[in-house]
Image: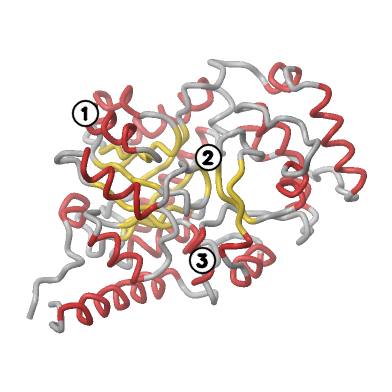
Amino acid sequence: MAKNPLHTPLCDMLGIEFPIIAFTHCKDVVNAVVNAGGFAVLGEAMHTPDEIAADIKWIRSRVGDKPFGIDLVLPASVPPTGDLDELRKKIPESHWNFWLDMKKRHNIPDPRGQVALHQWGGLNQEIARKQLDVLLEERVPVICSGLGNPAFILKTAHERGIKVFGLVGKARQAKKEAEAGVDAIIAQGIDAAGHTGPVGTFSIVPECVAVAGDTPVIAAGGVTTGQHLAAALCLGAVGVWTGTLWLASRESDNDMIIKEKLIAATADDTVYSDCISGFPMRILKCTWTDEWAKDGAPKVLPAPYQMLLSSDYIQAANDHRRPDLMTEAAGQGVRFITAMKPARQIVFDMVAEALGVFEDLTGVAPE
């Protein structure tokens, strides 16, 4: 029997059985993946400090001593502070007019309630810092930085026994963060959902491995199958970071309309655009992305102003459950999401597929 190829240094670092990290905005997915032997990271960039503290308590009550992570965005390029009214006043009138014209032509209603994106950590550094303080106080096992270099928190985090992972989209970012002392680098290709860099996964992962030294590299971007997991390990990664994979899971709290759109989608149904937040990201095509891609559309605003501009659209689409308007961050591996499976089964299916790949390649069954 051959050594188990899925037992990697990431498993030893985190005390997990499988080198699979689930990034999700749903606590139930975190619970299911962690208790199935994987690792999970909860995205909290759009939650208040009190909500983050409550979510951490909820997770701990269900996973016990098993480790988990929390993801925030820590961009240095946004204003240090500023309330919503101040920030919104800086959006040019031409951009407001473009949105109002779109709203009229597509019969887009007003949001019904509070706009969730108005408390996004990427709006200003003050919001992000207050969110981060909760993670440090609660001593969460792992802090992940989805946007921005987390070097400035390393000393404080490490003093509290907290590991810090950084997401990067370029090899030079990986080198810089490795030299700063992050505990792991998540090398994310343009295939990925959400905010990501311009380089493909099969290029960025080995590039980051080559410059990261002893810092482990985790592969991200389009990873939705056991074949992807096996390929990532062959590229030198110690595991995979997955996000789109969990959006249509049974535990996911996504709207059923979004789940059905994801199951029906292929890579061609995604688009790489900065028109949502001002940062490049991959999402499902929708009315908003189509309009901003047209000739004559105004220039996309830098963060956080573009996010403020798009937030009413996103909230209205979700509140009124308009399939033609609704969107979701989705990677190019979305084609392989074909059913609403329990998260536990998704973990085990990925493991079985990956082990099957290695057995086919070597002719020897792993332990």
Question: Label 1: few (<14), some or many (≥20) within 10 Å?
Answer: some
What is the x, y in percent for residue 328?
62, 54
Give the CA distance from mark 2 to mark 1.
33 Å
Q: Secondary structure at mark 2?
A: helix
Q: Which comes sooner in the sequence, label 2 or label 3?
A: 2
Name the kind of residue labelled 3 in the image: Glu
Quadrant of the frame with the N terminus: bottom left
In the picture of the structure, the residue carrying the numbered disc 2 is: 51
User: Relative to 354, is 196 on the left or the right?
Assistant: right
Q: Which comes sooner in the sequence, label 2 or label 1?
A: 2
Which residue is located at x 61 percent, y 52 percent?
Answer: 271
User: Relative to 235, is 90 on the left or the right?
Assistant: right
* Residue 179, numbered label: 1
Q: Secondary structure at mark 3?
A: loop
Q: Nearer the viewer, mark 2 or mark 1?
A: 1
Quarter holding residue 274: top right
Give the CA distance from mark 2 to mark 3.
20 Å
Which residue is located at x 72 percent, y 46 percent?
Answer: 314
* Residue 332, numbered label: none
What is the x, y in percent for residue 280?
55, 39
In the displayed structure, 38 sits above or below 132; it is below
Q: Nearer the viewer, mark 2 or mark 3?
A: 3
In the displayed structure, 339 sits above or below 206; it is below
Q: Secondary structure at mark 1?
A: helix
Give the CA distance from mark 3 to mark 1.
38 Å
Name the kind of residue labelled 2 in the image: Glu
In the picture of the structure, the residue carrying the numbered disc 3 is: 251
Quadrant of the frame with the C terminus: bottom left
Q: Nearer the viewer, residue 43 or 358?
A: 358
Q: Nearer the viewer, residue 41 or 104?
A: 104
In the displayed structure, 269 sits above or below 44; it is below
Question: Label 3: few (<14), some or many (≥20) within 10 Å?
Answer: many
